[in-house]
Amino acid sequence: MLKPIRTVLTAALLTIATVGVAAEMNGDHPDTYTVRRGDTLWDIAGKFLKRPWLWPEIWQANPQIKNPHLIYPGDVISLAYLDRVAVTPGPREEAPATGVPLSQVEPFLKNLRVVDEFEDLPYVVGLEEDRLRASLDQVAYVRGLSGAEAGQRYAIVRPTQRYTGINPKRCCDVTVQKADDLDFRGDMTKGTEQLWNHQMPATRGEFLGYELMQITTATVSRGEVGQAEASTLVVDQSGREVRVGDRLIPVEAQPYDLQFFPHAPKQEFAYGKAKVLAVADMLRTGGPRDVVALSVGSRDGVDNGTVFSSWRVGTDKVDRVAVGDDRSYDTVGHGNTVRLPDEYAGHMVVFRTFDKVSYALVMDSVRPTRVGYELKHPDAPY
């Protein structure tokens, strides 16, 4: 006999609890669905709901649910809502389905964070045998860890980006460049270890924070003893090579949330406030399963699970029928230009937030998402 929570779960996840939810169901769904490896709750809901980000609302109609992340590959889910047959459990040899594909976002969950400043953090001042780089089982000497005790572990991080808000009047079809990449001191440079690609105008907005990339971890083997003015740490994990200038922060046991529910933004943003700041992996555009950085964070009410729709900002076009075909944009008055509508691109789910910046995963799209695209309510009609 199935446990009650399993019955409630499936009824809540993929059956119709209310007339309002029924209106969201696609009419051609099959009677059952077998969960497959790699499925996410968004994917499953997207097969049968017109708006897949609304599946938490179905769950809310069933307050008995304690953990909705308990469906597994091999489970057979009934979609026949009238008899509310729940689920035929499959094997429990794999992890349950999650809200977003963790394999796509795990590097960003583990290895990236955004801070307001980093200059006061301890830093690597030298390496074993005066090497230029250090890797697994090699030694790094760190300044600023006075009082450190043997056995303490630290994450070695590197400042890589300086985020600033996008000026909506200047963004974004101005010039394409890799902007605000930082060297080992945190100063501006045209570096080679690029994770993001920017399309940023010359005029910047508000400072939003520095991005720190985790390089590896290290363990203190000896503090500042004798004549030494630096602590000794041994690199204890494979990763990028450590170099002079890398910073240190304490290792966090679980610095991120693995389970969260998609939901609409808690507030409506003024036009031009919420924008796509950057696209990961040196891409100029992002599509499904690409990670993007956003210009809003926890101070703006954005939390894990917040769903946005992204929109290409409508351009101002010269009305050439009215003014003639030989006039350029900067030679006509405002009354002779026409603002075109914004164009919908896709949906994205926030999976990690900081004070002023968030990371989101593009879940679906009808066109690529680019830097400078506007973020709106997931059901925004225009």
Image: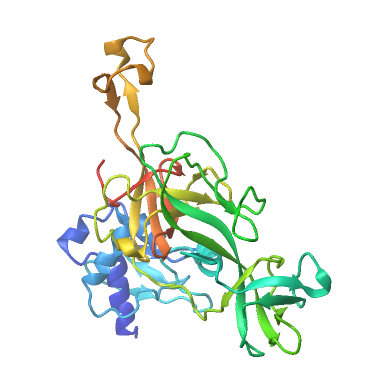
Quarter of the image for the N terminus: give it: bottom left
Q: Position of residue 202 (x, y in %)?
A: 48, 39
Residue 289 at least partly seen: no
Picture colour scheme: rainbow
Q: Position of residue 342 (x, y in %)?
A: 32, 37
* Depth check, front residue: 324 or 204: 204
* Depth check, front residue: 50 or 74: 50
Q: Position of residue 179 (x, y in %)?
A: 55, 46
Residue 269 lies, with reference to residue 248, above or below; the image says: above
Question: Looking at the image, which residue sits at the far right?
Answer: 129
How many callouts does the rendering have?
Answer: 0
User: Which residue is rendered at x = 50% and y = 60% of the image?
Assistant: 210
Question: Looking at the image, which residue sits at the far left?
Answer: 19
Q: For this view, does 263 lie left or right of residue 292?
A: left
User: Which residue is rendered at x = 22% and y = 77% of the image?
Assistant: 63
Q: For this view, does 299 lie left or right of residue 92?
A: left
Quarter of the image for the C terminus: give it: top left
Q: Position of residue 361 (x, y in %)?
A: 45, 57
Residue 165 lies, with reference to residue 145, above or below; the image says: above
Q: For this view, does 382 lie left or right of residue 276?
A: left
Q: For this view, does 373 lie left or right of residue 284?
A: left
Residue 164 at least partly seen: yes
